[in-house]
Amino acid sequence: MVEVRDPQRVTLENIAIGNDNGETNNGVDIRQAGSGRPSRMTYDGVYVYGMYQKQPFRKGLRFERVGKGDVVLLPHVQGNLRFVDCGRAAVLAGCTYEGSLVVEGKALPRDGLLGFQTRLATVVTYGLYLRDSQNIVMSDFYVEQSDSGYRFEGAPGDPAGRATIQGAKVEFTVPAGDPAKNTTFDIRGYHGEIFFGPDQFYTEPKLKRIRQQGEAPVALFLVGCSWYDSKPDVEMGPAARLFTIGNDTFGMQSVRYEAADAMPGPGLRALVPALDDLRRLGELDLRLNHPDPARRPVEKPVRSYSDRITPRG
């Protein structure tokens, strides 16, 4: 319905485009495509398709090949969001909610930042689809009343990616015995690191599935998490590592938390890349929303722990 190309400090605000129940037959509500020319675009009070629909790949707000020199600000957006080959752009999402978030694409390099400050996802299949071993930073991601939580996908040859996610709550509201749902972390060939927490794994379901398949090395860090009347149910292959650091339990009347805290070889230093991700997110917010010519950029992040992990075997 709306095509955006090479915007130069343009703002689209206070408008609903395609956020009905899908009765329109358009393919995408809003699409912004990059051309290699630097741009800057703001979406504020923009409502697209996705709320309560459980159709993560349909319609919504889509970004394609938004790259180096492109800046996208999303102070307030509702609905499905999809990023395709946007790994070099500077994207800052302030408050976004409902629908699913999809990130994908094979283009290299990926030296930009896809950053979310506050996001809510309810009544979704998965709140996040992170494909092609892509990168993302989310400082507050709240998921409830969903089928499952987070899906991480990759394929042979993907460079190592990193997901840094914090939040307040993860909860599912479907029958606990449904094998196609109730999966907290669904890792399918993702290569790299996943830092998750602090966050709260809420009571339903009591067994929080963590599933991994594929031969790509991946490390999952559960950091400072609260297991509220629930516990992890882990099934991982030899290429995966799981580290639980500073986790705690509450209200454990019916189940017990059985995963002992453990740290990787480098100890707490392995968490430095995630902390640097959050610092980069804060720096991007300051630079785009509160510019100060005297402010110096954040130092270059240290090398990831995933550069040093090897599969068991």
Image: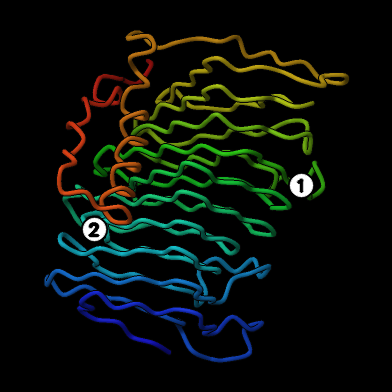
Q: Which mark is residue 178?
A: 1
Q: Which mark is residue 89?
A: 2
What residue appears at the point 32 percent right and 35 percent down from the top-left corner?
A: 279
Q: Is residue 259 above or below residue 33?
A: above
SS under mark 1: loop
Q: Residues within 10 Å of mark 2 (few under 14, many from 20)?
A: many
| Residue 61, position as x, y percentages in the image | 44, 73
Q: Quadrant of the C terminus?
A: top left
Q: Nearer the viewer, residue 75 or 220?
A: 75
Q: Amino acid at mark 1?
A: Asp
Judge left or right: residue 111 versus residue 28: left
| Residue 110, position as x, y percentages in the image | 21, 49
Dividing the picture into quadrants, the one containing residue 4 is: bottom left
**Which badge, 2 or 1, is on the more N-terminal residue?**
2
Q: Amino acid at mark 2?
A: Ala
What residue appears at the point 35 percent right and 77 percent down from the top-left corner?
A: 11
Q: Nearer the viewer, residue 73 or 198?
A: 73
Q: Nearer the viewer, residue 154 or 232?
A: 232
- Render colour scheme: rainbow
| Residue 124, position as x, y percentages in the image | 64, 59
What residue appears at the point 66 percent right and 32 percent down from the top-left corner?
A: 200
